[in-house]
Image: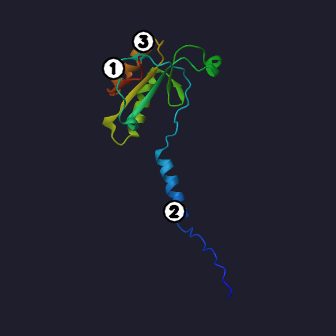
Amino acid sequence: MARKKREMPEMNTSSLPDLIFSFLFFIMMVTTMREVTLKVRFTKPAGTQLEKLENKSAVSFIYVGPPTDNLRAQYGSSTRIQLNDRYAEPKEVMDFIYQERQSMSDQSAQVVSIKADVKTQMGYITDIKEVLRKSWALKVNYSAMRRN
Protein backbone atom coordinates (compact mmCIF):
# COMPACT_ATOMS: atom_id res chain seq x y z
CA MET A 1 0.00 0.00 0.00
CA ALA A 2 1.32 3.33 -0.99
CA ARG A 3 0.82 6.06 1.52
CA LYS A 4 -0.40 9.44 0.36
CA LYS A 5 1.81 12.30 1.43
CA ARG A 6 -0.16 14.82 3.48
CA GLU A 7 0.17 18.41 2.46
CA MET A 8 0.32 21.18 4.99
CA PRO A 9 -2.75 23.43 4.69
CA GLU A 10 -2.04 27.08 3.89
CA MET A 11 -2.33 29.63 6.65
CA ASN A 12 -5.35 31.88 6.40
CA THR A 13 -4.03 35.47 6.29
CA SER A 14 -7.26 37.25 5.43
CA SER A 15 -7.53 38.89 8.88
CA LEU A 16 -3.88 40.01 8.97
CA PRO A 17 -4.50 43.49 7.44
CA ASP A 18 -7.24 44.15 10.03
CA LEU A 19 -4.90 43.14 12.81
CA ILE A 20 -2.08 45.36 11.53
CA PHE A 21 -4.44 48.31 11.09
CA SER A 22 -5.77 47.87 14.65
CA PHE A 23 -2.24 47.74 16.04
CA LEU A 24 -1.23 50.85 14.07
CA PHE A 25 -4.34 52.71 15.26
CA PHE A 26 -3.56 51.77 18.88
CA ILE A 27 0.03 53.03 18.57
CA MET A 28 -1.19 56.30 17.04
CA MET A 29 -3.64 56.84 19.90
CA VAL A 30 -1.23 56.26 22.78
CA THR A 31 1.82 58.01 21.35
CA THR A 32 2.30 61.68 22.10
CA MET A 33 4.20 63.80 19.65
CA ARG A 34 6.43 66.62 20.77
CA GLU A 35 4.71 69.78 19.68
CA VAL A 36 7.23 72.46 20.59
CA THR A 37 10.93 72.77 19.84
CA LEU A 38 12.48 74.43 22.86
CA LYS A 39 14.36 77.63 22.08
CA VAL A 40 14.90 78.61 25.70
CA ARG A 41 16.90 76.84 28.34
CA PHE A 42 15.34 76.41 31.75
CA THR A 43 16.13 74.65 34.98
CA LYS A 44 12.96 73.99 36.93
CA PRO A 45 12.83 75.42 40.43
CA ALA A 46 12.39 72.96 43.30
CA GLY A 47 9.28 72.80 45.47
CA THR A 48 7.73 70.68 48.20
CA GLN A 49 3.95 70.92 47.67
CA LEU A 50 3.52 69.85 44.06
CA GLU A 51 0.48 68.56 42.19
CA LYS A 52 0.38 66.78 38.87
CA LEU A 53 -1.72 68.28 36.07
CA GLU A 54 -4.73 66.11 35.28
CA ASN A 55 -6.07 67.27 31.90
CA LYS A 56 -2.98 68.06 29.83
CA SER A 57 -5.00 68.73 26.68
CA ALA A 58 -6.31 71.94 28.29
CA VAL A 59 -2.84 73.23 29.21
CA SER A 60 -1.09 76.05 27.35
CA PHE A 61 2.64 76.32 28.00
CA ILE A 62 4.70 79.50 28.26
CA TYR A 63 8.47 78.97 28.41
CA VAL A 64 10.71 81.63 29.99
CA GLY A 65 14.50 81.57 30.09
CA PRO A 66 17.71 82.39 28.24
CA PRO A 67 18.07 81.18 24.62
CA THR A 68 19.56 77.74 24.06
CA ASP A 69 23.28 77.53 23.35
CA ASN A 70 22.86 77.30 19.57
CA LEU A 71 20.66 80.46 19.49
CA ARG A 72 22.64 82.55 21.98
CA ALA A 73 24.85 84.15 19.30
CA GLN A 74 21.77 85.29 17.38
CA TYR A 75 19.55 86.44 20.25
CA GLY A 76 21.96 87.21 23.09
CA SER A 77 21.77 85.79 26.59
CA SER A 78 18.90 87.88 27.98
CA THR A 79 15.71 86.20 29.18
CA ARG A 80 13.19 85.41 26.44
CA ILE A 81 9.56 84.26 26.35
CA GLN A 82 8.70 81.39 24.04
CA LEU A 83 5.13 80.75 22.84
CA ASN A 84 4.88 77.55 20.78
CA ASP A 85 7.88 77.70 18.41
CA ARG A 86 8.64 81.42 18.46
CA TYR A 87 9.96 84.11 20.74
CA ALA A 88 7.46 86.71 21.91
CA GLU A 89 7.06 89.81 24.01
CA PRO A 90 4.80 89.88 27.09
CA LYS A 91 2.11 91.83 25.22
CA GLU A 92 1.83 88.99 22.65
CA VAL A 93 0.79 86.53 25.35
CA MET A 94 -2.83 87.76 25.19
CA ASP A 95 -3.20 86.80 21.51
CA PHE A 96 -1.57 83.45 22.23
CA ILE A 97 -4.04 82.75 25.04
CA TYR A 98 -7.04 83.64 22.85
CA GLN A 99 -5.78 81.36 20.05
CA GLU A 100 -5.20 78.50 22.45
CA ARG A 101 -8.62 78.99 24.03
CA GLN A 102 -10.35 78.89 20.62
CA SER A 103 -8.76 75.52 19.83
CA MET A 104 -10.08 73.90 23.04
CA SER A 105 -13.39 72.10 23.33
CA ASP A 106 -13.85 73.07 27.01
CA GLN A 107 -12.59 76.64 27.13
CA SER A 108 -13.32 77.05 30.84
CA ALA A 109 -10.81 74.30 31.69
CA GLN A 110 -7.85 76.21 30.23
CA VAL A 111 -4.77 76.18 32.43
CA VAL A 112 -1.63 78.19 31.65
CA SER A 113 1.59 76.52 32.76
CA ILE A 114 4.64 78.75 33.08
CA LYS A 115 7.90 76.85 32.69
CA ALA A 116 10.49 79.37 33.82
CA ASP A 117 14.18 79.09 34.51
CA VAL A 118 15.09 79.18 38.19
CA LYS A 119 17.18 82.33 37.60
CA THR A 120 14.42 84.28 35.80
CA GLN A 121 13.77 87.66 37.37
CA MET A 122 10.34 87.97 38.95
CA GLY A 123 9.64 91.05 36.79
CA TYR A 124 9.25 88.85 33.69
CA ILE A 125 6.86 86.54 35.52
CA THR A 126 4.87 89.52 36.86
CA ASP A 127 4.56 91.00 33.34
CA ILE A 128 3.26 87.67 32.04
CA LYS A 129 0.82 87.33 34.95
CA GLU A 130 -0.60 90.81 34.32
CA VAL A 131 -1.27 89.96 30.67
CA LEU A 132 -2.82 86.64 31.70
CA ARG A 133 -5.10 88.49 34.12
CA LYS A 134 -6.22 90.88 31.35
CA SER A 135 -6.98 87.95 29.05
CA TRP A 136 -9.00 86.16 31.76
CA ALA A 137 -6.59 83.23 31.99
CA LEU A 138 -6.85 82.92 35.75
CA LYS A 139 -5.75 79.31 36.23
CA VAL A 140 -1.96 79.54 36.30
CA ASN A 141 0.41 76.70 37.07
CA TYR A 142 4.15 76.98 37.71
CA SER A 143 6.23 74.01 36.61
CA ALA A 144 8.69 72.70 39.22
CA MET A 145 10.45 69.54 40.30
CA ARG A 146 10.18 67.85 43.67
CA ARG A 147 12.73 68.96 46.24
CA ASN A 148 14.66 66.09 47.82
Q: Residues within 10 Å of mark 1 (few under 14, many from 20)?
A: few
Point out the residue furthest to the bottom here: 1
Say few, some or many: other residues with alpha carbon within 10 Å of mark 3 (under 14 / 14 to 19 / 20 or more).
few
Residue placed most toward the observer, 19 or 95? 19
- Residue depicted at x 67% and y 88%: 1
Q: Secondary structure at mark 1?
A: loop
Q: Give the residue at mark 3.
A: 123
Of the two numbered discs 3 and 2 on the same chain, state the one appearing first in sequence. Answer: 2
Q: Position of residue 24 (x, y in %)?
A: 52, 53
Q: Position of residue 139 (x, y in %)?
A: 32, 27
Question: Which callout, 3 or 1, points to the residue nearer the camera?
Answer: 1
Q: Earlier in the sequence, mark 1 or mark 2?
A: 2
Type of amino acid at the residue the image marks with label 1: Gln
Question: What residue is shown with label 1?
Answer: 49
Quadrant holding the C terminus: top left
Front label number (3 vs 2)? 2
Residue 92 rendering spot, x and y as whole percentages: 46, 25
Is mark 1 in CB contact (under 8 Å) with mark 2? Answer: no
**Element at badge 3?**
helix
> Looking at the rendered structure, which numbered label has been put on residue 18?
2
**Horizontal and vertical percent position of residue 14:** 55, 69
- Determine the image quadrant of residue 121: top left
Q: Amino acid at mark 3?
A: Gly
For the point 44% across and 30% down, which residue is it?
96
Q: Which residue is at the far front? A: 1
Q: Earlier in the sequence, mark 3 or mark 1?
A: 1
Which amino acid, by three-letter code, is at mark 2? Asp
Q: Residue at x 69, y 86 (%)?
A: 2
In the foreground, 57 or 147 = 147
Q: Residue furthest right?
A: 2
